[in-house]
């Protein structure tokens, strides 16, 4: 199976579509297929005796209990969720347990009636995302799909229905972006080619009233020497994707610009990677997937913001025409770069994309990339790495991280790290050695972002999971979308 752009349709991107609704009235449990009560530790259970018994049965540390009760001649599932607190982390932990139960029901009624407005809105957001994650399946290439049973969820908050509906609408946009990001990451690399990524980006932008501009091989070869040095080793043509959403009251207001690394398969090039787990190098485009998906979610939510997404996309392959260690290339801004390792290719395509982004005079410039294995060594698979040339921008991203639960940790970007990138033969070399590999990669990119507030997100450890649960995580869509909401 190969991707054929002539038959590309939006049906190529399918994920489970759930319906989420808000109910202003009081929950009538006997009228529902399954019922879930969210009850904080100090809450008083209502009239549902089964819920009261389940709540009383929870011991210290327990957050969830479920049972079935007979109602009108049929068994009715009932569950109680008791988070340790009402902070996001507590709700996320409880919601994950509840979602594992909920996905086995056809529909679920969720009762938030004991919560205040702020807690009910946050709970609605968290539970929508948890339910969405539980029902997500990527079975596009399987003969027999096994979808989750859950079709819809209704949230009851009689006194706070408006706030819950607002949160629900926002969460649905986020879930859309997260699922799109997962789908793009999980798609096989013989299907998710640079052409497929460009076609998908265009379709998503136009679906929500945004615009798309796709530049091809000729433009890249003529103007973007660093990008072309990576792309030229593959039979797959490269593309530069430009998406624009004009949502601010002032269409001339400086936009936020997101840039995403789009290596749809990374063999390492002539500096070939080991064969073990090389299949996971299809995930080297997760920065691009995250940026495209966050853009789509922002446009779907119609955020009042001017937003641009830039994605350089190609493969990194060891063709006879591929770049060699020792080659010197000229970037879009005139900087010469000595390529010491062709497997440090992400920074080569990003540096030209960041230079291209300068034409928009960005109020904030953020790139996301699965850039360095060193970031996994430093931060594991819990937090993405953050480096920036502007502390206010870094603080905004850290605040968005705390609000969204998409963890981020800032690393330093001292001028001394640039010393490791000095070349005897060119302006820069593309690697700085083993010490501080994540930081020197960002230091390389900082050379191309000196005139704008810029931040770099290294998502190498957080964009996908390996092993039994192998698959794209949808990060950093929650982080980026929260940042954009706060900015707007």
Image (spheres, rainbow, N blue to C red):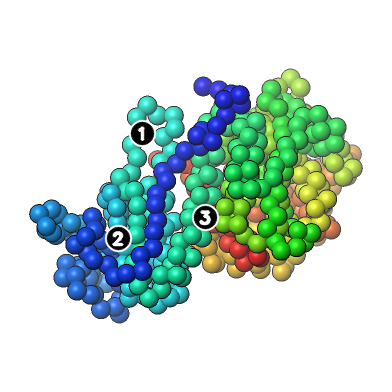
Q: Earlier in the sequence, mark 1 or mark 2?
A: 2
Q: Are marks 3 and 1 in contact (CB under 8 Å)?
A: no
Q: Earlier in the sequence, mark 2 or mark 3?
A: 2
Q: Are marks 1 and 2 in contact (CB under 8 Å)?
A: no
Q: Mark 2 or mark 3, which is nearer to you?
A: 2
Q: Residue at x 48, y 52 (%)?
A: 175
Circle number at residue 109: 2
Badge 2: few (under 14), some or many (20 or more) residues near its Cα, within 10 Å?
A: many
Q: How many marks?
A: 3
Circle number at residue 393: none
Q: Are marks 2 and 3 in contact (CB under 8 Å)?
A: no
Q: Residue at x 58, y 32 (%)?
A: 192
Give left or right: position of 144 versus 33.
right
The residue singled out by tag 3 in the image is 174
Q: Position of residue 372 (x, y in %)?
A: 64, 46
Q: Residue at x 70, y 42 (%)?
A: 212
The residue singled out by tag 1 in the image is 145
Badge 1: few (under 14), some or many (20 or more) residues near its Cα, within 10 Å?
A: few
Disc 3 is placed on an element classified as: helix
Q: Is residue 311 above or below residue 141?
A: below
Is residue 439 among the parts visible in the rendering? no
Q: Position of residue 384 (x, y in %)?
A: 58, 55
Disc 2 is placed on an element classified as: strand
Q: Position of residue 166 (x, y in %)?
A: 49, 65
Can you name the residue that lies furthest to the top here? 320
Real-space CA distance between mark 2 and mark 3, rounded to the nearest whole angstrom: 21 Å
Q: Mark 1 or mark 2, which is nearer to you?
A: 2
Real-space CA distance between mark 1 and mark 2, rounded to the nearest whole angstrom: 26 Å
């Amino acid at each position: 199976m190969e991707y054929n752009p002539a038959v590309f349709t939006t049906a190529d991107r399918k994920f489970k579509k759930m319906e989420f609704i808000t109910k202003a009235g009081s929950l009538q449990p006997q009228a529902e297929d399954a019922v879930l009560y969210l009850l904080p530790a100090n809450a008083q259970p209502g009239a549902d005796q089964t819920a009261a018994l389940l709540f009383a049965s929870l011991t210290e540390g327990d957050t969830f209990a479920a049972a079935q009760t007979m109602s009108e001649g049929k068994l009715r599932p009932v569950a109680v969720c008791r988070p340790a607190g009402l902070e996001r982390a507590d709700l996320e932990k409880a919601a994950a347990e509840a979602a594992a139960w909920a996905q086995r029901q056809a529909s679920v009624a969720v009762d938030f009636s004991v919560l205040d407005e702020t807690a009910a809105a946050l709970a609605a957001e968290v539970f929508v995302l948890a339910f969405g994650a539980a029902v997500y399946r990527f079975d596009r290439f399987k003969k027999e799909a096994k979808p989750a049973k859950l079709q819809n969820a209704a949230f009851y908050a009689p006194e706070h229905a408006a706030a819950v509906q607002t949160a629900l609408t926002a969460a649905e946009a986020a879930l859309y972006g997260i699922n799109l990001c997962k789908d793009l990451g999980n798609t096989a690399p013989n299907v998710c080619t640079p052409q497929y990524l460009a076609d998908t980006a265009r379709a998503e932008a136009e679906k929500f009233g945004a615009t798309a501009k796709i530049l091809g091989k000729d433009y890249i070869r003529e103007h973007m020497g660093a990008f072309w040095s990576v792309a030229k080793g593959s039979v797959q043509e490269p593309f530069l994707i430009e998406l624009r959403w004009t949502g601010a009251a002032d269409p001339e207001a400086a936009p936020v610009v997101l840039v995403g690394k789009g290596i749809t398969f990374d063999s390492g090039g002539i500096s070939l990677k080991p064969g073990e787990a090389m299949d996971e190098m299809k995930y080297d485009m997760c920065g691009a997937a995250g940026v495209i998906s966050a853009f789509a979610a922002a446009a779907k939510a119609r955020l009042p913001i001017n937003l641009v997404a830039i994605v350089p996309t190609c493969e990194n392959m060891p063709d006879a025409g591929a770049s060699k260690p020792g080659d010197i290339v000229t970037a879009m801004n005139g900087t010469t770069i000595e390529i010491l390792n062709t497997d440090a290719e992400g920074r080569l395509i990003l540096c030209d994309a960041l230079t291209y982004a300068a034409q928009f005079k960005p109020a904030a410039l953020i790139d996301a990339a699965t850039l360095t294995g060193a970031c996994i060594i430093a931060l594991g698979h819990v937090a993405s790495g953050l480096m920036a040339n502007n502390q206010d921008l870094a603080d905004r991203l850290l605040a968005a991280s705390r609000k969204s639960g998409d963890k981020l940790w800032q690393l330093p970007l001292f001028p001394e790290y640039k010393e490791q990138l000095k070349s005897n033969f060119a302006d820069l070399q593309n690697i700085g050695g083993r010490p501080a590999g994540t930081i020197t990669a960002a230091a390389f990119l900082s050379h191309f972002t000196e005139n704008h507030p810029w931040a770099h997100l290294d998502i190498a450890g957080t964009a996908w999971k390996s092993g039994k649960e192998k698959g794209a995580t949808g990060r950093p869509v929650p982080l980026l979308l929260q940042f954009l909401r706060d900015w707007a």
